[in-house]
Image: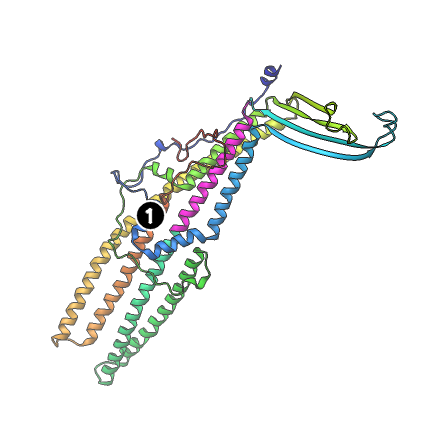
């Protein structure tokens, strides 16, 4: 009978319609040649050789509130999976009670018990075990494991993003502080220029127009310095908050751009590397969770068989409560099967498949966004390489012009105002060079984040039983 009723389960017309992107269908990113060692190490920021930056990131990972929220969600998801796992095993409960009550004279008990006050006593152990013949509990557990591992990947994604944000904010602060030093040098140079022009006007060698132009440059540079002070303060505050500290915690921090050789742009990046991105892995596990949810709902179409048993003592009065004659016990199976539910189960299954389609489309979007993220970083890096080359050429030209102006002044062939003018050009070009150099490190950090930031795929939650297995590998489907 059970097998016959099970054959009545009708899933016709209900199935997922979305399809996951296959890794073999994706092209790599960048020029097609090998680039070993591209994938970042777990502590990739240590390659910059800045102990101060290492300390800031370590503190952020320890104290950042948003990261703590993500970690708490991991614990919550693991606890939920462990609770669902327990449903696969026998459940045993105990109960003991003693009740003083008046028995009805016209009910089950005849006089003299009927109509009298008595003490009803019982002590029982009850057990129940749901036979998971059609895999409902197993599928529910696999769905919960998928959500748990997705939460773990989300926490890792938050960690990677946090480390990248700290590094980028630190390098931005270093850039701004370097610009402050340069602006102070530019202010001294402008003040010297203003004084020389004033002297030339007083000597009749120049006109008032030149003096007014020189006077305007000093407040302009002071205005720029005030704007830089604001940006530095905001960068300090942002960095402090990332570390889980008060805004003034970084007031004395002096950041530095790395003095080592600038990072080099990587070559070809295979698409499979994106399988190491925590957000892609999380999306993949959510797909697995929703697919297992479909299997759980399908199992509800089949019979549900429970084994139950009880043993204990029951008596009226305390004197014979625990005697052999007061023993009671029983055991037996229970069968339940949906026969007519007005399409409730089919509607539930349709909802599950729709959620699975959403999860698959979200996974595909995560893969494509990851590809775009890496491609954007590499495109910006290639453009920046050209800018750096041209800027170095411009820097060399103005430096040569400055050396020539200084030599002519020392030889008595020109005045010092020409030297200051040439020096101003050098400072302006250096200003641009600092921005470009800082941009290199910003893009390097961005590429580390885009490639997953050293994310290491774990074995999943530890609270589950040793029999727990996974049927799907994380990362890009292929």
Left or right of 182, for residue 452:
right
Quadrant position of residue 296 = top right
Name the quadrant containing residue 120. top right
Image: 108 above or below 166: above
Query: Can residue 357 be seen here?
Result: no
Out of 476 and 347, give the one closest to the viewer.
476
Span highlighted in magenta in the image: 134-163
Total label count?
Answer: 1
Which secondary structure type mostly characterizes the magenta part of the structure? helix
Q: Quadrant of the C terminus?
A: top left
Q: Is residue 235 above or below residue 73?
A: below
Residue 439 position in % (x across, y down): 31, 55
Residue placed at 54% from the left, 26% from the top?
14
- Judged left or right of residue 122, residue 288 is left
Q: Secondary structure at mark 1?
A: helix
Residue 141 magenta-highlighted: yes
**Few, some or many residues within 10 Å of mark 1 (<14, 14–19, 20+):** some
The picture places residue 375, in percent across and down from the top left corner, at 34, 44
Q: Position of residue 444 (x, y in %)?
A: 31, 50
Residue at 55% over, 27% down: 136
């Amino acid at each position: 009978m059970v097998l016959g009723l099970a054959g009545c389960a009708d899933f016709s017309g209900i199935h997922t319609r979305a399809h996951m992107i296959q890794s073999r269908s994706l092209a790599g990113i960048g020029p097609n040649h090998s680039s070993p060692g591209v994938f970042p190490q777990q502590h990739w920021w240590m390659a910059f050789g800045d102990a101060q930056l290492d300390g800031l990131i370590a503190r952020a990972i320890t104290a950042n509130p948003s990261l703590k929220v993500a970690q708490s969600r991991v614990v919550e998801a693991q606890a939920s999976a462990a609770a669902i796992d327990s449903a696969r095993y026998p459940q045993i409960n105990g109960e003991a009670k003693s009740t003083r009550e008046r028995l009805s004279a016209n009910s089950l008990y005849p006089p003299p018990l009927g109509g009298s006050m008595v003490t009803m006593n019982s002590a029982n152990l009850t057990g129940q075990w749901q036979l998971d013949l059609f895999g409902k509990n197993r599928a529910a557990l696999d769905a919960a494991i998928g959500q748990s591992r997705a939460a773990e990947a989300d926490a890792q994604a938050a960690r990677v993003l946090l480390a990248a944000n700290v590094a980028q904010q630190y390098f931005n602060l270093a850039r701004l502080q370097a610009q402050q030093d340069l602006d102070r040098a530019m202010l001294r140079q402008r003040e010297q220029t203003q004084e020389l022009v004033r002297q030339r006007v007083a000597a009749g060698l120049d006109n008032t127009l030149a003096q007014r132009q020189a006077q305007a440059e000093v407040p302009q540079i002071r205005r720029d310095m005030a704007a830089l002070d604001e940006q530095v303060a905001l960068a300090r505050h942002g960095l402090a908050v990332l570390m889980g500290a008060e805004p003034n915690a970084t007031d004395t921090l002096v950041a530095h751009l790395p003095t080592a050789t600038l990072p080099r742009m990587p070559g070809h990046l295979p698409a499979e590397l994106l399988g190491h991105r925590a957000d892609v892995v999380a999306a993949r596990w959510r797909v697995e969770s929703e697919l297992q949810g479909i299997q759980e709902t399908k199992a509800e179409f089949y019979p549900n068989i429970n084994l139950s048993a009880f043993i204990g003592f029951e008596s009226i009065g305390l004197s014979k409560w625990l005697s052999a004659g007061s023993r009671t016990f029983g055991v037996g199976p229970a069968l339940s099967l949906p026969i007519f539910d007005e399409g409730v189960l089919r509607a539930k299954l349709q909802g599950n498949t729709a959620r699975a389609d959403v999860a698959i489309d979200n996974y595909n979007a995560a893969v494509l966004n990851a590809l775009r993220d890496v491609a954007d970083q590499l495109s910006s890096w290639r453009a920046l390489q050209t800018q750096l080359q041209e800027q170095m050429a411009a820097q060399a030209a103005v430096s040569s012009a400055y050396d020539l102006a200084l030599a002519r002044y020392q030889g008595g062939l020109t005045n010092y105002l020409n030297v200051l003018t040439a020096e101003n050009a050098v400072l302006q070009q250096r200003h641009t060079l600092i921005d470009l150099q800082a941009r290199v490190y910003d893009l390097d950090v961005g590429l580390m984040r885009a490639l997953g930031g050293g994310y290491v795929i774990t074995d999943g939650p530890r609270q589950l039983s040793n029999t727990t297995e996974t049927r799907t590998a994380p990362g890009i489907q292929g």
